[in-house]
Image: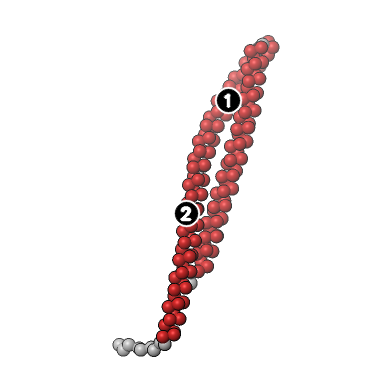
């Protein structure tokens, strides 16, 4: 098998080298941008993960409190229904007021947890969109 000799001018060689060096510089900029993007994404994912773990724990605790409070309310309702004369009792009235305040507090907590849950879901959807579309576009933009 013979070797084909191609003659290239010094100018053509230098032009190729300049072109290649420009490509390398552009590719390095792309790689740096992608690494920065991935670092930022990982940081956001770590922050989001920490938030989800804390929120998950808060939801579990909140559910336990709701269940316990529900049983207490049921017993209170039975006690006042079974003993109509106790409705007039100061102790029952005090307990009822306390339970009303507790209920209002639980409602506020429930709404706060619901808002946090909504913001986490929204952030997850943003990450899902970003990862599926934006990154793909970035990689494809300079890949032959």
The answer to whether residue 78 of the structure is visible from this angle is: no
Disc 2 target residue:
39
Q: Is residue 84 above or below residue 131?
A: above
Determine which quarter of the picture holds residue 75: top right
Q: Residue furthest left?
A: 1
Q: Position of residue 32 (x, y in %)?
A: 47, 61
Give residue 110's position: percent from left, percent from top: 60, 34
In the image, what residue occupies the spot 42% across and 87% down?
9
Residue 47 lies, in percent from the top left, at: 50, 45
| Front residue of 96 and 9 | 9
Residue at the (52%, 67%) spot, across then down? 141
Compared across the picture, whether 97 is left or right of 142 comes to: right
Name the residue located 58 percent from the left edge and 22 percent from the top edge.
72
Number of numbered discs: 2
Is residue 66 visible in the rendered structure shown here?
yes
As drawn, is 13 to the left or to the right of 77? left
Residue nearest the observer in this picture, 86 or 50: 50
58 vs 70: above or below: below
- Label 2 crowd (10 A; few <14 / some 14-19 / many >=20): few
Classify the position of the N terminus by image quarter: bottom left
Image coloring type:
secondary structure
Viewer-nearest of discs 2 and 1: 2
Q: Which residue is mark 1?
A: 69
102 up-or-down from 137: above or below: above
- Dot 2: element: helix
């Amino acid at each position: 098998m013979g070797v084909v000799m191609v003659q290239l001018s010094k100018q053509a060689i230098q032009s190729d080298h300049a072109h290649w060096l420009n490509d390398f510089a552009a590719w390095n900029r792309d790689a740096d941008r992608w690494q920065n993007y991935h670092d930022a994404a990982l940081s956001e994912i770590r922050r989001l993960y920490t938030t989800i773990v804390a929120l998950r724990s808060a939801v579990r605790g909140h559910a336990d409190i709701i269940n316990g409070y529900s049983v207490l309310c049921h017993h209170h309702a039975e006690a006042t229904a079974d003993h109509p004369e106790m409705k007039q009792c100061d102790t029952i009235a005090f307990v009822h007021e306390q339970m009303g305040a507790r209920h209002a507090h639980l409602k506020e907590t429930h709404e706060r947890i619901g808002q946090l849950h909504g913001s986490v879901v929204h952030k997850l959807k943003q990450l899902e969109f970003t990862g599926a579309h934006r990154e793909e576009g970035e990689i494809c933009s300079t890949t032959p």
